[in-house]
Image: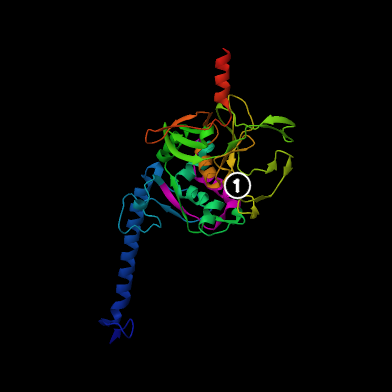
C-alpha cells in the first residue's frame, strides 16, 4: 500500500513511501540526530573550558540580558551593539532592563559597578564603568536647564528625567580598559584661573576641557553658616578633592536656612537639580570653597559667589567624572593670559591684588 505525504496544500509532495519502512527510517533519523548533538556538546565543552579568563562566563545578571563579546567583527554580528560600533575595549554587554531616572541613577550605577567591576578597582568602580560608556556623561550633561531652554524645552524637575532607557547597552570594561581609565584619572587636574572666570580640566598635561565659571566676590560678609564674617573671595592655592557630595542639601549660608526650589534667570521657579558637589582643600585647609553647579547661568563670568567656583549644570557632571577623591586642584590668579593665537590679554584685577603688590613694592 502506498500513500502521499503532503506538508501543506500549497507545498509540493514528497514522493511515495512504503508505510512498512517508516518506523525503521524514523529510528535511524532519531539516532543520527542524537549522535550529532552529543558530538556538538563535547566540542562546546572543550572549547569553553579553554577560554581566557577575560572572556569566560559573565557574572549573574540582575539588570538585563548579557551578550558576550564576539572575537571578530562581522557583517552578520547579531549583538545589539556590534563590536565595530564602539572603540572601547570591553568584556561583554549588558542590556538595561528598565528606565532609570536621575533620582535612581546613583543606586543603579552603584549596583552595576559592584557586580561587574573588579573588587581591586572598587574605589573607582563608578568612574571606570561610566568612562567606558561615555554616552552616560553626555546624557547627564544634556539635562542642563538652560541648554534645554535654548532648544525650546522646559525642565521642571531634572530628577524625573530618564538617564538610561530600557534596552540601553552598557559595555563592561576589560581589565586593560579599566587600567587605562584609572591611569587617565590619576593624571587629571582641575585648574581655575580666578580673574579669567575659566576652569580647565587638564589630562596628561594637556587641556581637555575649558568652561566658564563664576567666582567669589571681593568683599566680606557675615554668614550664619560660619557664625562669623568671612571673606567671599575664592582662595588662591593648590590642593586636592577631599569630599564629594552626590546628593547635596541646599542651604543658604547667609541665614543657614535650607531650600528646595530655585529661581531661574527666566523668572521661573523649578525643583533643585540632583548634581554632585566637590570640595577641595586649598594649601592644606578646608576653606569652604566648593566646586558646584549654579542654577543661575547669568552669573557665569562674574565675581558673584560666596567663595565657591560655580559651573553650568551640565559642566558639573563632566567635572565630577574627571575628579574623584584625590584629584589635584589649582586655584590661581593670573592676570596675563595668552590665547590660542599667541595674543596676550591683561585681565581685570577683580581682587585688586596687583595694586596691593605695587603699593608694597613702593613701600620697600
- Name the residue nearer the viewer: 228 or 32: 228
- Dot 1, crowdedness within 10 Å: few (<14), some or many (≥20)? some
Residue 53: image quadrant is: top left
Q: Residue furthest top?
A: 364
Residue 167 placement (x, y as % from top left) = 48, 58
Mark 1 element type: loop
Residue 171 placement (x, y as % from top left) = 44, 49
Vertical position of residue 350 compared to residue 68: above or below: above
Observer able to see residue 119: no
- Name the residue nearer the viewer: 227 or 139: 227
Q: In the displayed structure, does residue 70 sit left or right of residue 289?
A: left
Residue 248 placement (x, y as % from top left) = 64, 43
Return the residue at label 1: 296
Q: What residue is at 31 percent from the left and 77 percent from the top?
A: 22
The answer to if 93 sits in the magenta stretch is: yes
Give the number of callouts.
1
Observer able to see residue 101: yes
Vertical position of residue 166 compared to residue 183: above or below: below
Residue 176 placement (x, y as % from top left) = 40, 38
Which contiguous range is marked in magenta? 91-120
Q: Quadrant of the C terminus?
A: top right
Q: What residue is at 51 percent from the left and 59 percent from the top?
A: 166
Q: Residue furthest left?
A: 15
The answer to if 219 sits in the magenta stretch is: no
Q: What residue is at 29 percent from the left and 85 percent from the top?
A: 4
- Name the residue nearer the viewer: 271 or 195: 195
Amino acid at each position: 500500500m502506498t500513500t502521499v505525504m503532503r506538508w501543506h496544500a500549497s507545498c509540493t509532495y514528497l514522493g511515495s513511501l512504503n508505510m512498512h519502512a517508516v518506523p525503521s527510517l524514523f529510528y535511524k533519523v532519531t539516532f543520527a540526530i542524537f549522535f550529532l548533538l552529543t558530538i556538538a556538546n563535547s566540542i562546546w565543552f572543550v572549547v569553553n573550558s579553554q577560554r581566557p579568563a577575560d572572556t569566560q562566563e559573565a557574572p549573574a545578571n540582575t539588570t538585563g540580558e548579557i551578550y558576550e563579546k564576539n572575537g571578530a567583527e562581522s557583517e552578520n554580528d547579531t549583538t545589539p551593539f556590534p563590536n565595530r560600533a564602539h572603540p572601547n575595549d570591553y568584556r561583554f554587554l549588558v542590556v538595561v532592563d528598565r528606565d532609570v531616572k536621575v533620582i535612581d541613577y546613583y543606586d543603579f550605577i552603584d549596583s552595576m559597578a559592584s557586580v561587574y567591576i573588579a573588587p581591586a578597582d572598587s574605589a573607582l568602580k563608578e568612574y571606570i564603568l561610566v568612562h567606558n560608556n561615555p554616552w552616560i556623561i553626555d546624557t547627564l550633561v544634556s539635562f542642563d536647564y538652560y541648554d534645554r531652554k535654548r532648544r525650546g524645552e522646559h525642565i521642571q524637575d531634572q530628577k524625573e528625567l530618564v538617564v538610561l532607557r530600557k534596552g540601553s547597552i552598557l559595555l563592561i570594561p576589560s581589565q586593560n580598559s579599566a587600567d587605562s581609565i584609572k591611569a587617565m584619572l590619576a593624571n587629571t587636574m582641575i585648574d581655575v584661573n580666578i580673574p579669567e572666570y575659566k576652569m580647565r580640566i587638564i589630562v596628561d598635561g594637556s587641556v581637555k576641557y575649558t568652561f566658564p565659571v563664576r567666582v567669589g566676590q571681593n568683599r566680606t560678609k557675615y554668614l550664619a553658616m560660619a557664625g562669623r564674617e568671612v571673606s567671599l573671595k575664592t582662595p588662591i592655592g593648590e590642593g586636592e578633592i577631599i569630599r564629594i557630595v552626590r546628593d547635596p542639601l541646599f542651604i543658604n549660608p547667609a541665614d543657614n536656612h535650607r531650600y528646595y526650589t530655585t529661581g531661574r534667570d527666566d523668572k521661573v521657579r523649578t525643583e533643585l537639580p540632583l548634581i554632585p558637589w566637590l570640595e577641595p582643600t586649598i594649601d592644606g585647609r578646608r576653606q569652604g570653597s566648593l566646586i558646584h553647579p549654579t542654577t543661575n547661568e547669568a552669573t557665569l563670568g562674574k565675581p558673584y559667589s560666596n567663595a565657591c567656583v560655580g559651573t553650568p549644570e551640565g559642566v558639573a557632571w563632566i567635572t565630577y567624572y574627571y575628579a574623584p577623591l584625590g584629584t589635584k586642584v589649582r586655584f590661581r590668579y593670573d592676570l596675563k593670559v595668552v590665547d590660542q593665537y599667541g595674543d596676550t590679554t591683561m585681565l581685570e584685577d577683580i581682587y585688586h591684588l596687583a595694586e596691593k603688590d605695587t603699593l608694597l613694592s613702593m613701600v620697600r
